[in-house]
Image: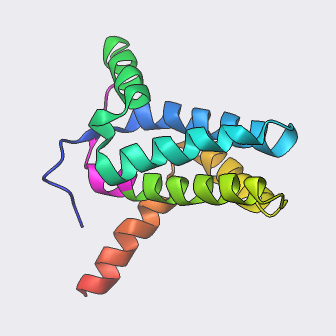
Amino acid sequence: MLRFDIAPVCSNAYRIQAAVTLTVSAIYFLTPYKWVALILALGGLLRGFVSPHKCPSYLGFSALTRKLGLAKTINAGAKMFADKLVAIAGTIMLVTWLMGSEIGLIPAAVLMVFAFIDLVSGFCAACWAYTLWYRVRGA
């Protein structure tokens, strides 16, 4: 569902956010610093369930892309859906680490793959799934 109650978001700012997600997921996956999953959980929670416009990192990245002349606005709905998935994955990573389980490496690897694809190509798999769901549901 398109979100007209929330102002459009900058897709290029979200590509920078994908770089952060990739970096944090790689730190989780490759180092003993598993607490970094908290960054994904809280950031995804704030951007996905509250509003991207309340997130300090998004606001900073949006200002940067605007200053560089790279701002490109899109509807917030699909990106908020992607952030909800990041919040869920980050929470799973954090909780499984606190429980002493290695199962959190699975969502970390998935986030690394999809964040890398988004970063290098601009293709957001969660956004694609979001729009496909509403097309199929509406048909």
Q: Going by the picture, which residue comes out furthest to the front? A: 99
Would residue 75 be counted in the magenta stretch? yes
- Residue 67 image-quadrant placement: top left
Tell me what residue is drawn at x 42 percent, y 24 percent. 61
- Residue 95 image-quadrant placement: bottom right
Using the image, determine if residue 135 lies above or below residue 126. Answer: below
How has the structure been colored for display?
rainbow
Q: Give the magenta-colored segment's residue range.
A: 70-80
Q: In which quarter of the image is the C terminus?
A: bottom left
Residue 135, position in %: x, y?
Answer: 30, 77
Query: Along the line of sight, which residue is nearer the eye, 126 or 99?
Result: 99
Judged left or right of residue 19, residue 50 is: left
Q: Going by the picture, which residue comes out furthest to the bottom? A: 139
Tell me what residue is drawn at x 70 percent, y 43 percent. 25
Judged left or right of residue 103, residue 114 is: left
Would residue 24 be counted in the magenta stretch? no
Tell me what residue is drawn at x 33 percent, y 16 percent. 69
Residue 85, position in %: x, y?
Answer: 51, 59
Residue 47, position in %: x, y?
Answer: 38, 44
Query: Is residue 45 something one can see in this rendering?
Result: yes
Query: Along the line of sight, which residue is nearer the eye, 88 or 11?
Result: 88
Tell me what residue is drawn at x 14 percent, y 54 percent. 4
Using the image, determine if residue 137 lies above or below residue 40. Answer: below
Judged left or right of residue 76, residue 96 is: right
Using the image, determine if residue 138 lies above or below residue 52. Answer: below
Q: In which quarter of the image is the N terminus?
A: bottom left
Query: Is residue 70 something one can see in this rendering?
Result: no
